[in-house]
């Protein structure tokens, strides 16, 4: 698939590696081929205590956009360095090991992985080897068991603290986080409504994910009216993935002691903050005792084991559906990250970079 | 002081009573004599189980403004009925009792009291008789031990959860709530900075209340620059009493896991919500794990005993200063409520309606 060249010389393996390099920060709008370039370099040396990976899957997430602005604000995610590879969560197959804990063929979750075909990484605590588990696929570790699944779990379970019968609203409901958030809320006995960007995705939410209701925010553009219709009894939990006008509309429909976990604000990432949509009705939070709470999943790593146990259980029992939009080949990274902001995908966006050597 | 007329007929006492009646809702801006009229009526019948009060003190609070808009939003406080008296917290002296638990001369805290010179009220659970306590004045029950003191305590102690050495910012710091909030944060070992509306009040905050720093938001109008100057180590707790641009500026200076109790938003009460200042940088809450939480003190009544015990202790030990701006006579209600929005007062605004019969 990728024009891979491998040669063995004195135990070293040399590969020609393509990677996406950030050439210029993206102050506003979407990244283009002006900002991100696919470059080729050779990878050869694997120092002691390091591993060489063939990258199988790369996770494409909205927050990655915020690492390309050159500004520390909003998510406060570390900015990519110019002339260095962009980074993302990935799954790789060990093709060379200079660490006793890893063998060739091991499948590993790699955080902060270069967006590339191959990489060399120290065998440190950030890596997580995947043990084959019946009912759980490799790709699940980037989706239900990865960043979006954990974000959905922290938002719904930890901060949302849902009670059976409560009314839960999820925006970007067919997106990477939304897919799992809605199912987690349903599994806790809530009534769940989602907003999404197409009629096809409305159908997907209701028919495949079990959402009670869903609406297309591109056609039901009066959000206040839409929320009045879908929440005659008000909103108890709103998992916010978009910010802006939708968040403002929600604040006109919250119940007393509503919880609003802020997971991210995809409608706002391509703008400088002074150009973002202001929320004018925060005063409603006072009268209704509403709690709004931003979160980064890195702050909840002490709950990661609990999350894994719960969600692996659901996957094994067939209680949780996953949905991916798969792009193919490392060359698709620019297209795939831009696609997050046009609402054209259903499910978690990933790139299949290489197929595993071992079937 | 008030042209009181009292006559006794068959055990009944008749008084001529002046009260402020809401004639028209105040959609935007400040109330005027067009909306609120001082009217005279006779009060005579005291049914069984009821008490007649001579009103000594009336509490004048910003939230009262939100009960005059005719709209249920924002604080969601019950709207005053047209052609009925406005309501407020008050302290009254019993002048006629048809309930065995009360005697003439008892001093009582009266919630939802008509803004008037006299009133008749059922002797129900809402009333609270004041027992004379050394070091605690009657008026303290409307200030340090009343609505503003309890609001400050819920905001700082319950929701703010301050740790020694944390950086605390309080807006409207010389206002009814701010005066106590700053002292509560200082008593917990925090560094406290306040914003207020005059140089005289800046001096008051620093010299009389022990604020570490304070600034005049009317002269230091670049809030971002002011907060950068006064919070070189960022803000851990912001007790928001104003909303709008100040809240937005704070979100550019919050530390990880900052808490923002929303007590009220005085800069926004005179506007319809669509005209209010939008907050554009809520995304910063995500990256910094910030919690923002609105509260109504009525939701924390289960903590009222704990609050009273703590603050009565401070008052007895001389550890807490109180500060009032006292208006005189029932006729001053319109002027006094408008004064809340011009930043012309220091301390809690109250009206002394009558002096007690018993010295």
Image (cartoon, coloured by chain):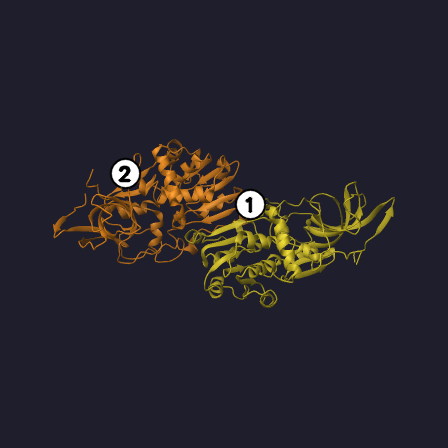
Chain colours: A yellow, B orange
Residue A202 position by quadrant: bottom right
Q: Is residue A292 in view from this perspective?
A: yes
Whether A133 is drawn above or below B193: the answer is below
Residue shown at 44%/37% (left/top)?
A: B185
Pick the front one: A247 or A334 = A247
Marked residue chain, label 1: B
Horizontal and vertical percent for residue A164?
Answer: 51, 60
Pick the front one: A135 or B154 = A135
Marked residue chain, label 2: B
Q: Quadrant of the image for the N terminus of chain A? A: bottom right
Residue B288 - label:
1
- Asked whether, in this view, residue A157 is left or right of residue A326, the answer is left
Horizontal and vertical percent for residue A332?
Answer: 71, 57
Circle 2 Cα neighbour tier, 10 Å, few/some/many (<14 / 14–19 / ≥20): few
- Asked whether, in this view, residue B13 is left or right of residue A131, the answer is left
- Which of discs 1 and 2 lies nearer the camera? The answer is 2
Outermost residue to the right: A10
All told, the count of numbered labels is: 2
- Asked whether, in this view, residue A141 is left or right of residue B188, the answer is right
Label 1 – label 2 distance at C-alpha: 48 Å
User: Element at badge 1?
Assistant: loop
Circle 1 Cα neighbour tier, 10 Å, few/some/many (<14 / 14–19 / ≥20): many
Q: Is residue B174 in view from this perspective?
A: no
Horizontal and vertical percent for residue A206?
Answer: 58, 67
Outermost residue to the top: B207
User: Element at badge 2?
Assistant: loop
Residue A262 - label:
none
The tag earlier along the polypeptide, 1 or 2, is 2
Instruction: State the residue position of label 2.
Output: B132
Horizontal and vertical percent for residue A358?
Answer: 80, 56
Pick the front one: A124 or A162 = A162
Q: Dots 1 and 2: beta carbons under 8 Å?
A: no
């Amino acid at each position: 698939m990728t024009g891979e060249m491998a040669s063995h010389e004195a135990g070293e393996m040399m590969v020609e590696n393509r990677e996406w390099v950030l050439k210029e920060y993206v102050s506003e709008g979407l990244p283009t081929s002006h900002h991100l370039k696919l470059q080729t370099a050779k990878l050869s040396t694997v120092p002691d205590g390091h591993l060489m990976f063939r990258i199988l899957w790369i996770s494409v997430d909205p927050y990655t956009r915020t690492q390309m602005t050159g500004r520390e604000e909003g998510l406060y995610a570390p900015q990519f360095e110019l002339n260095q590879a962009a980074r993302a969560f990935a799954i790789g197959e060990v093709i060379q090991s200079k660490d006793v804990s890893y063998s060739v063929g091991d499948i590993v979750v790699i955080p902060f992985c270069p967006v590339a075909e191959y990489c060399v990484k120290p065998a440190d605590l950030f890596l997580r080897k995947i043990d084959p588990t019946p009912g759980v696929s490799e790709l699940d570790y980037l989706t239900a068991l990865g960043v979006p699944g954990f974000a959905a779990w922290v938002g719904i379970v930890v901060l949302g603290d849902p009670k059976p019968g409560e009314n839960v609203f999820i925006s970007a409901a067919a997106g990477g986080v939304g897919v799992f958030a809605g199912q987690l809320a349903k599994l806790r006995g809530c009534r769940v409504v989602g907003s999404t960007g197409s009629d096809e995705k409305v159908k997907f939410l209701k028919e495949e994910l079990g959402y009670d209701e869903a609406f297309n925010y591109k056609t039901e553009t009066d959000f206040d009216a839409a929320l009045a219709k879908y929440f005659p009894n008000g909103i108890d939990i709103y998992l916010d993935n978009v910010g802006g006008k939708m968040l403002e509309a929600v604040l006109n429909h919250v119940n007393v002691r509503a919880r609003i976990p802020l997971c991210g604000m995809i409608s706002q990432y391509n703008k400088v903050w002074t150009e973002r949509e202001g929320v004018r009705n925060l005063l409603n939070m006072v009268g209704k005792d509403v709690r709004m709470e931003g979160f980064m999943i890195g702050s909840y790593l002490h709950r990661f084991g609990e999350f894994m146990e719960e969600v692996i259980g659901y996957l094994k029992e067939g209680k949780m559906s996953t949905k991916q939009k798969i792009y193919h080949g490392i060359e698709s990274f620019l297209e795939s990250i831009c696609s997050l902001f046009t609402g054209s995908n259903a499910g978690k966006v990933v790139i299949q970079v290489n197929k595993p050597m071992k079937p």
